[in-house]
Image (spheres, rainbow, N blue to C red):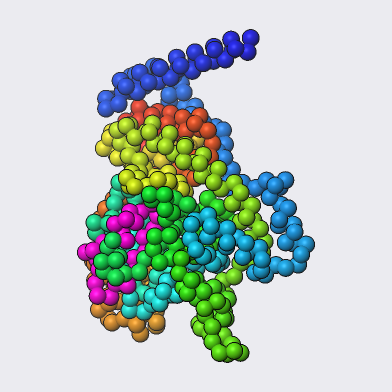
């Protein structure tokens, strides 16, 4: 009986999908209202009152399992040792080992991991740091926090990463570092970036705040440059609430980072005369022991989750890449592993009968598929001009340097503008933690909108 039922439902599934497939084949690129209205009710866009493709919830985030995860945190609570001690040190060791770096220092969050790395590489007032505009705002505000000047290098829209072809044009005698961001968890082209950095004697601070254990040629991002920075904020793939880390193979540098997160007190090679007291300008960015206990629990499941995301991302990408108007991210040839914090693709209005990206997103959400338009253009946000007006910046830079109009002209990123304002669409990492059937829902919803693009466009207009 059971077998029979399964067979029947399988036949039904195949039949339905064959019908949808035929409708899809017929209607792509044609005005197909007539066909659209005679097929299934389920083919009427949810945005216009049809049945949504999906009503089931998506995998919840963060994942926390009391049975396995709470033992360590209870031990910490009951011990009364809550400030930085052995559990934090254990996490640091484990993270360094996980990413294949010699050393790791934790700090309160990813933003301060970047600030720590930049300041302890002595980047500051008067220096220029090259950064992509397609990132979270903290990549840029971290540069400003040191007193250095962010210089934007345009985005490669196919990979969503900093365009290596455009880096050298932006190098001046004041350029001190490149801050590549492995945005969405997809590796930036570190092979070329490191070549350019060597040639021009530049430091490299990798923002791997979305790219835990992503790899190029089996070497992890975050270990190519002088420092790699990570975030463990709650939305990230290793969620601790808040948390950050800096990794490096350079002992002297990591000792300085450690000292910096602990008021500038002596640590390792950061030593002075006996009883000399605090040695350098530091601050306090220390972890608590409970953070580390949560982090260690999350690390237990991280590799497996990453594997699932990876498989789903490859499956989804392969099945939507040939839909005209849907252009998923491209990975560089040398990438051996991605972290998929996000699944980004480009939506091309012209291939969807002129349907706007906003309307596409609205329609996709109505079908039960959460999605967003991603980052806004960072290089045009008011925080830059407002930083230029501060006392510190006025003391460190000339009037010409702080001429905002001139700065804007020198920092135009037309490719990034197009990506942010017209094309990008994101799915979040938790959606990739389900099954291939979940991915099929995304595919069906996109195809449904594709088939009804004209109708949705007209409904949106009226
Ligand atoms: C999240 C993030 C940061 C900042 O990390 P926090 O832990 O939130 O401070 C920096 N850069 C990128 C690319 C990020 O995604």
Question: In this image, 144 relative to 96: left or right?
Answer: left
Residue projecting furthest to the left = 169
Q: How many marks?
A: 0
- Residue 140 in picture, x, y percent from top left: 39, 65
Q: Residue at x 64, y 52 (%)?
A: 297
**Along the line of sight, the residue nearer the viewer: 21 or 247:** 247
Q: In this picture, which residue range is highlighted in magenta?
A: 167-194
Q: Is residue 391 above or below residue 421?
A: below
| Quarter of the figure with the C terminus | top left
What residue appears at the point 47 percent right and 27 percent down from the top-left corner? 50
> Residue 1 location in percent, x, y?
63, 9
Magenta highlight on residue 179: yes
In this rendering, does residue 110 appear at all? no
The residue drawn where x is 33% and y is 37% is 326
Nearer to the camera, 422 or 60: 60
Q: Is residue 5 visible?
A: yes
Q: Quadrant of residue 313?
A: top left
User: Magenta span has 25?
Assistant: no
Q: Is residue 8 above or below residue 326?
A: above
Q: Position of residue 351 (x, y in %)?
A: 28, 35
Q: Given the current orientation, which residue lies at the most extreme right position?
A: 78
Q: Is residue 17 above or below residue 402?
A: above
Vertical order, 352 against 85 (above or below):
above
Q: Residue at x 40, y 17 (%)?
A: 18
Judging depth in this view, the residue of 258 and 184 nearest the camera is 258
Indicate the position of residue 287 as horizontal and vertical percent values: 61, 67
């Amino acid at each position: 009986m059971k077998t029979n039922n399964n067979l029947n439902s399988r036949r039904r599934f195949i039949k339905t999908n064959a019908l949808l497939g035929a409708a899809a084949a017929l209607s792509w690129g044609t005005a197909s209202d007539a066909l659209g209205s005679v097929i299934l009710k389920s083919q009427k866009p949810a945005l216009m009152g049809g049945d949504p493709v999906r009503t089931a919830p998506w995998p919840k985030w963060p994942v926390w399992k009391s049975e396995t995860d709470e033992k360590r945190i209870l031990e910490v609570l009951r011990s009364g040792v809550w400030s930085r001690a052995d559990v934090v040190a254990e996490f640091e060791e484990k993270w360094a080992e996980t990413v294949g770096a010699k050393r790791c220092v934790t700090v309160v969050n990813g933003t301060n991991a970047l600030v720590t790395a930049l300041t302890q590489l002595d980047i500051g007032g008067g220096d220029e740091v090259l950064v992509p505009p397609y990132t979270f705002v903290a990549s840029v505000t971290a540069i400003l926090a040191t007193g250095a000047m962010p210089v934007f290098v345009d985005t490669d829209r196919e990979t969503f990463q900093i365009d290596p072809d455009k880096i050298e044009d932006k190098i001046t005698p004041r350029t001190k570092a490149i801050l590549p961001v492995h945005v969405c968890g997809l590796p930036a082209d570190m092979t070329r970036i490191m070549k350019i950095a060597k040639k021009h004697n530049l430091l490299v601070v990798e923002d791997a705040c979305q790219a835990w254990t992503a790899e190029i040629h089996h070497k992890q991002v975050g270990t190519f440059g002088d420092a790699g920075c990570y975030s463990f904020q709650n939305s990230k793939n290793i969620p601790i609430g808040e948390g950050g880390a800096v990794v490096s193979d350079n002992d002297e540098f990591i000792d300085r980072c450690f000292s910096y997160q602990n008021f500038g007190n002596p640590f390792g090679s950061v030593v002075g005369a006996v009883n000399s007291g605090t040695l350098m300008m530091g601050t306090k960015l220390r972890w608590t022991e409970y953070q580390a206990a949560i982090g260690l629990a999350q690390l237990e499941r991280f590799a497996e989750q990453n594997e699932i995301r990876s498989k789903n991302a490859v499956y989804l990408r392969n099945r939507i890449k040939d839909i005209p108007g849907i252009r998923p991210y491209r990975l560089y040839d040398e990438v051996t592993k991605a972290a998929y914090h996000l699944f980004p693709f480009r939506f091309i209005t012209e291939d969807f009968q002129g349907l706007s990206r906003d309307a596409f997103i609205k329609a996709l959400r109505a079908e039960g598929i959460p999605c967003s338009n991603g980052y806004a253009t960072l290089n045009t946000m008011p925080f830059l001009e407002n930083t230029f007006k501060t006392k510190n910046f006025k003391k460190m830079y000339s009037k010409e340097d702080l001429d905002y109009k001139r700065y804007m002209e020198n920092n135009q990123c037309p490719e990034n503008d197009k990506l942010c304002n017209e094309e990008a669409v994101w799915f979040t990492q938790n959606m990739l933690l389900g099954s291939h059937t979940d991915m099929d829902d995304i595919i069906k919803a996109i195809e449904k909108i594709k088939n009804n693009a004209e109708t949705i466009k007209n409904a949106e207009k009226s």
